[in-house]
Image (cartoon, rainbow, N blue to C red):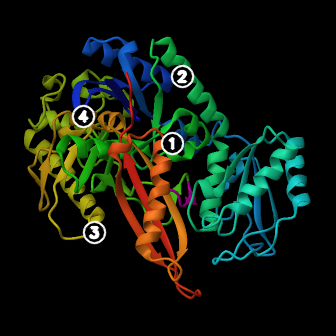
């Protein structure tokens, strides 16, 4: 069974064709302004290079930048209606508090606060008032706002009020697309609500993108299902991605880290993914990217959904180098590397040119950089590696000696066998690690609940949650024989009666593919 992973980056679109756990063929193609065209070109090249027909594929996994680009550039965002279940609390901090002014201006948001919400122990702050909710839905319908968000205080612990409110909305506005904040984020109300608003704002673009991918793949002769990769390194179906595009916005670094783990065999490591413009650095824990803490900033907005903990440095193969070699980056030629860099016949001095001039890489026409002083070029390469070493130290959380796995098209910037005190590993197919990571992505599911351990032993509570996660995994398409628990977190909640404890169980499984 063949599967293809495709990862769209700012500079390149990579594709890797896998058969089982073997990399059959991998290609790197320039990212196009029309991302869908670039994806199809990468798919065409990788299948042609492997000598197979598109109809032989069993699955296609895509990591796309469509959605993060839309948020960063503040374009193609849908109008959003926000209903907060909270009164009489939270009135001092309305929706969109703390948002950058340009982001508020880019979004057409109509918000309203109504009775509802929960205390941390599950008691109602106030019961829902159906008339308030239905009036809001009617108002949004009249304004032509189709994407609605429902957010409630502590709904991450109990989503019953949010679900009831959604049902009331559908009674008067059946075509509304509703995002519940409990489906996206974690405990904190504002960050969870923010993440849900961003998800809803991407609603129209997500459906158009998924439809465009589906149509293009059909036109290319692909009859297999396709999936999008999530921020946590696992898969979601195309239909689910259309509902929750926010869960895919940071899949690029995650794909690289998962691919690095697969190609190197290192389950615990630091991964440095060097692209054309930036280097993304993160930690692998048991083969998965370490997740960020409670709050992550996205397009200037604080959110709290699943995101990899990645530190980004403005340093890549396309980074601009000043004529006196004194500064490198953060500006980059990006996807124009193969036309603008000196070694490719261009007129711009880049970090890749330095690697060739220093004699550390063979790329393009070396004669084009023969005028550069070799010793100066080597000194610049040493500074590049020192910057990477410093960045690695920001990511490390212990003194343990773990390998540094180097991946990405800009890997030529690292020539040392150690960065700081850590050994360097550059695995085979490292240039397409992101596409390999996408192709090998697994299905995941998790449950996050608050349990009173005075009424149920911890082991029984965890097993009950684990059983529900298994069912969710099977429903998502996982092979029942491949499921494994990734992590179990328990957090006692202080200052509350009983032994209330928050338990989170996360599991993964291999995607079940059939001929």
Which badge, 3 or 2, is on the more N-terminal residue?
A: 2
Instruction: Give the Cα distance between marks 1 and 2.
Output: 22 Å
Stretch of the chain drawn in magenta: 300-306
| Tag shown at residue 475 | 1
The structure residue drawn at horizontal position 37% and vertical position 24%, both measured from the top left corner, is 30
Is residue 303 within the magenta segment?
Answer: yes
Q: What residue is disc 2 on?
A: 214
Q: Which residue is mark 4?
A: 431
What count of labels does the image hold? 4
Give the residue displayed 24% in from the left and 56% down from the top: 387
Q: Position of residue 224 (x, y in %)?
A: 45, 21
Residues at marks 3 and 2 touching, judged by CB atoms closer than 8 Å: no
Q: Earlier in the sequence, mark 2 or mark 4?
A: 2
- Name the image quarter holding residue 512: top left
Reading the chain from its start, which is encountered first: label 1 or label 2? 2
Q: Secondary structure at mark 4?
A: helix
Q: Nearer the viewer, mark 3 or mark 2?
A: 2
Observer able to see residue 103:
no
Residue 238 on image: x %, y %: 53, 33
Say which of 453 and 347 sits in front.
Answer: 453
Q: Please tell me which residue lies in front, 290 or 162.
A: 162
């Amino acid at each position: 069974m063949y599967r293809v992973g495709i990862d769209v980056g700012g500079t390149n679109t990579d594709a890797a064709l896998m058969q089982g756990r073997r990399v059959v063929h991998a290609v790197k193609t320039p990212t196009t302004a029309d991302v869908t065209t670039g994806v199809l070109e990468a798919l065409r090249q990788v299948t042609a290079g492997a000598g197979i027909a598109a109809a032989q594929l069993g699955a296609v996994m895509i990591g796309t930048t469509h959605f993060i680009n839309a948020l960063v550039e503040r374009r193609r965002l849908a109008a959003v209606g926000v209903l907060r279940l909270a009164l009489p609390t939270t009135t001092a901090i309305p929706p969109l508090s703390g948002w950058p002014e340009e982001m508020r201006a880019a979004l057409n948001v109509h918000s309203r606060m109504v009775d509802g919400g929960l205390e941390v122990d599950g008691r109602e702050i106030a019961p829902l008032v159906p008339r308030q909710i239905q009036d809001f839905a009617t108002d949004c319908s009249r304004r032509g706002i189709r994407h609605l968000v429902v957010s409630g205080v502590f709904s991450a612990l109990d989503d019953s009020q949010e679900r009831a409110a959604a049902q009331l909305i559908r009674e008067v506005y059946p075509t509304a697309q509703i995002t519940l904040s409990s489906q996206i984020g974690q405990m904190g109300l504002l960050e969870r609500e923010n993440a849900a608003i961003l998800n809803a704002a991407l609603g129209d673009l997500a459906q158009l993108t998924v439809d465009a991918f589906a149509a293009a793949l059909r036109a290319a002769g692909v009859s297999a299902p396709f999936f999008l990769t999530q921020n946590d390194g696992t898969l979601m179906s195309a239909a689910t991605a259309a509902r929750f595009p926010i869960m895919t916005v940071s899949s690029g670094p995650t794909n690289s880290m998962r691919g690095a783990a697969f190609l190197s065999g290192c389950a615990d490591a630091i991964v440095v993914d060097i692209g054309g413009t930036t280097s993304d650095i993160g930690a692998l824990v048991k083969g998965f990217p370490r997740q960020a803490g409670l709050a992550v900033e996205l397009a200037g907005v604080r959110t709290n959904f699943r995101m990899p903990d990645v530190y980004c440095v403005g340093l890549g193969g396309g980074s601009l180098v000043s004529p006196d070699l004194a500064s490198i980056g953060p500006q980059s030629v990006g996807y124009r590397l193969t036309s603008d860099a000196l070694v490719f016949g261009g007129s711009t001095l880049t970090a890749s040119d330095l690697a060739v001039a220093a004699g550390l890489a063979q790329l393009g026409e070396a004669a084009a950089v023969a005028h550069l002083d070799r010793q100066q070029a080597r000194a610049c390469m040493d500074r590049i590696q020192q910057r990477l070493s410093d960045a690695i130290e920001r990511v490390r959380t212990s003194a343990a000696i773990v390998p540094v796995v180097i991946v990405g098209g800009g890997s030529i910037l690292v020539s040392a066998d150690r960065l700081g005190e850590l050994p360097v590993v550059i695995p085979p197919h490292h240039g397409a690690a992101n596409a390999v990571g996408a192709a090998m992505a697994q299905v995941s599911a998790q449950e996050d609940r608050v349990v009173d351990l005075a009424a149920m032993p911890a082991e029984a509570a965890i097993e009950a949650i684990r059983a529900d996660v298994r069912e969710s995994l099977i429903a998502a398409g996982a092979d029942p024989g491949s499921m494994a628990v990734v992590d179990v977190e328990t957090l006692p909640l202080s200052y509350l009666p009983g032994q209330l404890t928050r338990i989170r169980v996360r599991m993964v499984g291999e995607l079940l593919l059939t001929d």
